[in-house]
Amino acid sequence: MELSPSAHADPFCRDRLPPFHLWPELRFDLPELHYPDRLNCAQRLLDDAVERWGADRLCLLTPSEKWTYGELLRRANQVAQVLTEDFGLHPGNRVLLRGPNNPWLVATWFGVLKAGGVAVTTMPLLRAAEITELHDISRPAVAVCDHRYLDELTSADTPGLAVLAYGGPEEGDLSRRCVVKSGDFSTVATAADDVALIAFTSGTTGRPKATMHFHRDVLANADTFSRHVLKPRQDDVFTGTPPLAFTFGLGGLVVFPLHVGAATLLIEQATPQRLADLVAEHGVTVLFTAPTAYRAIMAAGAVDRLAGLRRCVSAGEALPAAVWEEFHAATGLRIIDGIGATEMLHVFISAADEDIRPGSTGIPVPGYRAAVVDEEGRPVPDGQPGLLAVTGPTGCRYLSDPRQTTYVRDGWNVTGDTYIRDAEGYFWYVARSDDMIVSSGYNIAGPEVEKALVAHPHVAECGVVGAPDEQRGMLVKAYVVLHAGIAADEVTAKELQNHVKQAIAPYKYPRAIEFVTELPRTSNGKLQRGELRKLARGSAR
């Protein structure tokens, strides 16, 4: 395997790609997946869109403003000018992005790619210690941050990192710097296999894994799942709740709509009722969110506000058949379920319309192949559980991470999910195969929460697992052994929860805490999380 000559002056990413023999097999079975050697996905999604559909076409919406494709292009070019002219950004340099879903975050993402940089998307709720870890892994040259989220970033240990805020009143704010730029910028002619973005996913050891994706990968997900399953139209208006730091959100709220000339409504945060109201107010036709939100909208009695929708997409966690059926009965809409992975960039098993089997994730998306295998990689018979393995035009490339050999086996991406394939070729979710907790669509590593908990002086030891939960699918549950003399009561539990919220991203905190006198361990002292999961399942009944 050979890579095209890189346009990156900074070889950081290429130097840290896994050796070729550890890559998954890549398949380009569809004609639309045959991209030219020189390709910048920002050029294809933005400049080409303006040339094809005109600068005045509506592109980005918020509850209070509207940007056309031409305005987004001008601001993306201005961002690229600021980064290259004011901050000396070179092709291949990484730029850390931190902020909620809003137009300036999108403009910055495009500006980074147009300048030949590598976008490092991060969750805006991450705490200083978490940001420090992501910085140590990806080594960004610049961080572009919503001014409301600067505190944790500036508190992080990030030597040499230049910080550029946007949306604030300061003289050096990105938006003010852009005003004095011409908006004329020649997009860097990156290679199709130059790294465009680094996306982080929680590792079950607690250390995040950095996944590297090429410019062609960004388009490949639009030319597979979006083109063949979602089938968006130019007159669609997209919206959803996943952060753009999640590849699920980046695809569903930026890449897929812009790929067809549609518009997207960006929401920073919203209750289920507010989300439903925004769908109605802005004529939204395509909604991306997690099963939790569909349940909550029904519980709030707000399904009538979804009358304008024609497409609903669910991912991030398994969609129960009962939720699908209830939502269909209430709205007439057929939720498109799907499984994706940060390592694969987006959804690779799904089904739409008459192909849907409620309770099943679906069938392989055109361009992908999937199998259910045993621990040795051998296919298991239909109807028997095994590990989900997938291959297609995208695949896992961790940045300098030994866990590459765990995720990629014999050319297949082994996702860490247990599945059953039926005789018709449909895939049915059984469980996660590792210590990951998937709660309301968020991936949360139990060991990371444990690390935060044991830092509190009251905690002697702890174990964290997922507990079944009707609303969230799973919730984070901690089994805690306290030091002598500490009261095992609600006050202590609340103190521990607040401590975790301050130590790591608040959505990771244990919503349930059970105080115990000891934890189940093996003869050599290893925590038996399987036993804790059994306890959690029992207590949920």
Image (spheres, grey):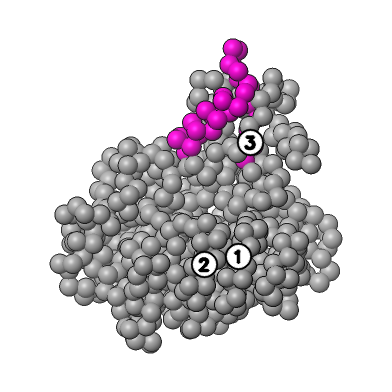
N-terminal of the pair, mark 2 or mark 1, is 2
Residue 512 is labelled as 3
- Say which quarter of the image contains residue 344: bottom right
- The Cα atoms of the two marked residues, 3 and 1, are separated by 28 Å
Q: Is residue 311 above or below residue 293?
A: below
At 59% from the left and 12% from the top, the residue drawn is 485
Q: Which residue is mark 1?
A: 302
Count neighbours of disc 1 (C-alpha within 10 A) and say few if under 14, some if 14 to 19, many if 20 or more. some
Q: Contact, CB < 8 Å: mark 2 with mark 1?
A: yes
Q: Residues within 10 Å of mark 2 (few under 14, many from 20)?
A: some
Left or right? Give the position of 7 relative to 332.
left
Identify the secondary structure beneath mark 2: helix
Q: Which residues are magenta?
A: 476-504
Q: Secondary structure at mark 1?
A: loop
Taking the image as drawn, is residue 503 in sight? Answer: yes
Asked where in the image residue 245 lies, by quadrant, the reply is bottom left
Q: Earlier in the sequence, mark 3 or mark 1?
A: 1
* Mark 3–mark 1 CB contact (< 8 Å): no
Answer whether residue 480 is magenta in the image. Answer: yes
- Is-magenta flag for residue 228? no
Q: Position of residue 402 (x, y in %)?
A: 54, 45
Q: Residue at x 69, y 23 (%)?
A: 516
Residue indicated by mark 2: 277
The image shows residue 16 at horizontal and vertical percentages of 43, 52
Residue 194 showing in the rendered view? no
Indicate the amino acid at tag 2: Asp
Amino acid, disc 1: Ala
* Front position among marks 3 and 1: 1
- Secondary structure beneath label 3: strand
